[in-house]
Image (spheres, coloured by chain):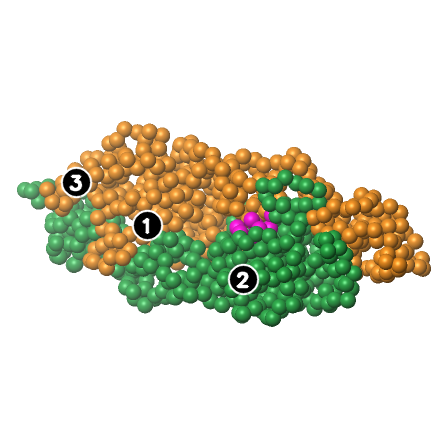
Chain colours: A green, B orange
């Protein structure tokens, strides 16, 4: 049987199968069915300096106060404030400089009445001193080999001292489990002496594309075919979400072959994502595969546009997520379903896209019986967040993905929306461009 | 001479040097002096699927229309709209199905009056057809081995066809030079057949910490010393900015050694960053180094808090950027100066932090004669952007860096600010948490 005869046969049979009988779930329902299977992966330790982009597997509390000692916040002189009370009335008070305390050193002598120590920014305050007077506010005099510091104004007690524990007391919570680690987290973990960070292993995410219409990126166009843009896009999205993409190429429309490839991937990787082959009337290879195999179908229709055909199944505890082959729908399906799965496997505290209210920047007239997730561009002007829907937002559209900072959520009952209306947006990863 | 004697000697000399005579530049002036030296690095080609996070070195225009052909956006039947005009008045119109066009294939026959082709989502529209009627709106009948499709309503011409060139015509600009490449850019580059992407080489950024007070992250605390949190923080910040960090460890307070190490680094790497050793009255090793060596000092004082001591010099065309040793000041100095340098070297179209207006979430009472860059947390509520200054914002503070989404810019003449006032914020890289 040729491919076309096979297709003809399928087409003649398809009125009798269940492809039109899918029950549409709401997005949150579908997420609710899927996420319990996003099992937390094993812990591993990574060197602190390489931990950026990982999620903390255990909360961190301060093992000691921070700063760990009273510290000078100025270059100047550590003194006893009481010694300066008489300064400038009208005479300069002169204190004997008995020590020099560089940063990182400790005082060699205690400060007593009438004495002072030269001290550098960041150095530990010597015993006895309770104040630092800044360099620029002093004068100096050397007499008989002894240095004296002159002070012309009374000093407030405690001035220019950063007290021990200002930022953290012992036991203070510093970072919660599930926190995303960035430069700021690394700084505080370094300060507290955490050279290795407990994180969850990165999920290995296998990706298949389906469809005989697909050309590789480096192939010339031929009539009727398109280049596979979903696989490289998914590879980048998986990395961005913290996963390790494992690109397994294209599955052609051969159910037997697809079945064995997907089964092998489900046994070897933490998550299997396919793109294409899920549409009604499509050759629907993923749908067939999910129906025919043992395992649990979680959903195969979602009340959303684009991506209503997004399908998920669980087999042997592993998740198979079948995204639409339409680039826009594939992108939205990834952000709503794959991204939180990949986040949860790493223990992310906030695996979902942030949800904000924005002001619609221009009218939006498209209504649908399903909730619409419209790619849009955010702009902040005069402290107000605006969302501008992409001009062309067909599920097949590829070009607008790059210009989108968010998805505007348009509920089915919204009717036509006008510029100035408040809308809910889901913030996509990355910087706001506007 | 012991270290302490050396320090004593330095201290006795320091009133006569120029450390107090620094001329403070405004941040934008300082940036203006520095950025011309951020030389564009060489182009290289990276495989498309690994190009995320890089900056496009050449603009990209569409080499062909996209989509490249009229495409069905539905599973259904390709028909001639005129053939359906009589449908439902009152009879069903029956058309002979003469072809089946899977996705990726081309039609074997032209559609003529009275005929139709079964067509899949994404497949190329056959010659002669001008409309697709969706599967669900049809019925079918087989008679004498011939399949007929029944249509009960007139169809609008052009329906369910995504026309060739809908997204892009040949020559349309797609991506400008300097665009940051992410998943969406990768998708469109894949669709247009760009397997290798021209980008700029990543800058190699050498980092030295200075200061005898520094312990490594894995060392136990000892009195007077602190762990080096700036180096691992800078390593993460450099990666985040697209650079390749080269961590060269700590320089102790030895001018000769520092000089040779820094000189070697300037000859070997694209940018040298140091942290610490720039304060007035500090041992100021970086300042000394910059003064004593041949080369051009760009600035050594900036009218900003924190980080007023931020220093930059150019030697042999290479930039030496000496950041404060205070973690908060080091962080701010990096974001205002190092980050744009690293971005410009890669050809980034937007190397600076985005500048937004926000509503101050609570009163801010600290005034300063210099512009203050206050670490703050952003929140979006009811489409309004609020900025909440960190409770403790000393330049030495490490803990609040991780909780900051932005820097509030407080000009010196602001006076005391109240909740509800509009302020300028510089958005820091990463997601808004609130």
On the image, the x and y values in percent for residue A375 come to 63, 52
- Which numbered disc, 1 or 3, marks the residue that appears first in the sequence? 3
- Can you tell which mark lies on residue A356? none
Q: Which residue is mark 1?
A: B230
- Can you tell which mark lies on residue B10? 3
Dominant SS in magenta? helix
Left or right position of A260 against B269: right
Residue A234 on the magenta segment? yes
Q: Based on the displayed image, in which of its 4 quarters is residue A127 positioned? A: bottom left
Q: Which residue is mark 2?
A: A264
On the image, the x and y values in percent for residue B376 come to 44, 54
Q: Disc 3 is attached to a residue of which chain?
A: B
Asked whether the viewer can see residue A267, the reply is: yes
Contact between labelled residues 2 and 1, with CB atoms less than 8 Å apart: no
On the image, the x and y values in percent for residue B291 come to 26, 33
The nearer-to-camera label among 1 and 2 is 2
Contact between labelled residues 3 and 1, with CB atoms less than 8 Å apart: no
Asked whether the viewer can see residue B393, the reply is: no
The magenta stretch spans which residues?
A: A229-237
The nearer-to-camera label among 1 and 3 is 1
């Amino acid at each position: 049987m040729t491919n076309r005869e096979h297709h003809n046969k399928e087409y003649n049979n398809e009125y009798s199968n269940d492809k039109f009988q899918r029950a549409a779930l709401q997005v949150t329902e579908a997420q609710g069915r899927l996420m319990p299977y996003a099992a937390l992966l094993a812990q591993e330790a990574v060197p602190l300096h390489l931990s950026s982009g990982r999620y903390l597997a255990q909360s961190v509390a301060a093992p000691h106060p921070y700063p760990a000692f009273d510290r000078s916040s100025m270059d100047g002189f550590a003194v006893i404030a009481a010694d300066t009370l008489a300064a400038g009335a009208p005479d300069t008070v002169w204190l004997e400089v008995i020590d020099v305390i560089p940063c990182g050193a400790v005082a060699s002598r205690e400060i007593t009445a009438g004495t002072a120590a030269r001290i550098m920014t960041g150095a530990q305050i010597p015993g006895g001193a309770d104040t630092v007077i800044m360099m620029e506010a002093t004068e100096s005099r050397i007499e008989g080999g002894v240095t004296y510091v002159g002070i012309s104004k009374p000093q407030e007690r405690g001035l220019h001292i950063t007290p021990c524990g200002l930022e953290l007391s012992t036991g203070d919570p510093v970072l919660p489990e599930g926190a995303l680690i960035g430069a700021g987290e690394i700084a505080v973990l370094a300060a507290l002496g955490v050279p290795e960070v407990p994180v969850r292993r990165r999920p290995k995410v296998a990706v298949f594309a389906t469809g005989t219409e697909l050309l590789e990126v480096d192939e010339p166009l031929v009539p009727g075919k398109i280049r596979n843009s979903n696989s490289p896009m998914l590879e980048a999205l998986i990395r961005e979400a913290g996963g390790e993409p494992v690109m397994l190429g294209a599955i052609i429309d051969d159910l037997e072959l697809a079945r064995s490839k997907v089964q092998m991937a489900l046994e070897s990787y933490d998550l299997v994502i396919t793109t294409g082959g899920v549409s009604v009337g499509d050759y629907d290879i993923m749908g067939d595969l999910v129906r025919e195999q043992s395992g649990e179908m979680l959903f195969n229709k979602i009340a959303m546009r684009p991506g209503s055909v997004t399908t998920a199944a669980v087999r042997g505890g592993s998740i198979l997520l079948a995204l639409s082959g339409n680039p826009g729908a594939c992108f939205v399906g990834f952000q709503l379903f794959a991204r939180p799965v990949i986040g949860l496997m790493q223990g992310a505290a906030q695996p979902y896209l942030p949800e904000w209210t924005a002001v619609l920047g221009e009218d939006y007239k498209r209504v649908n019986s399903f909730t619409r997730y419209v790619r849009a561009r955010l702009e902040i002007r005069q402290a107000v967040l605006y969302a501008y829907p992409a001009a062309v937002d067909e599920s097949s559209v590829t070009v607008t993905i790059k210009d989108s900072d968010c998805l505007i959520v348009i509920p089915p009952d919204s009717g036509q929306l006008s510029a100035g209306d408040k809308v809910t947006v889901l913030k996509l990863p990355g910087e706001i461009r506007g």
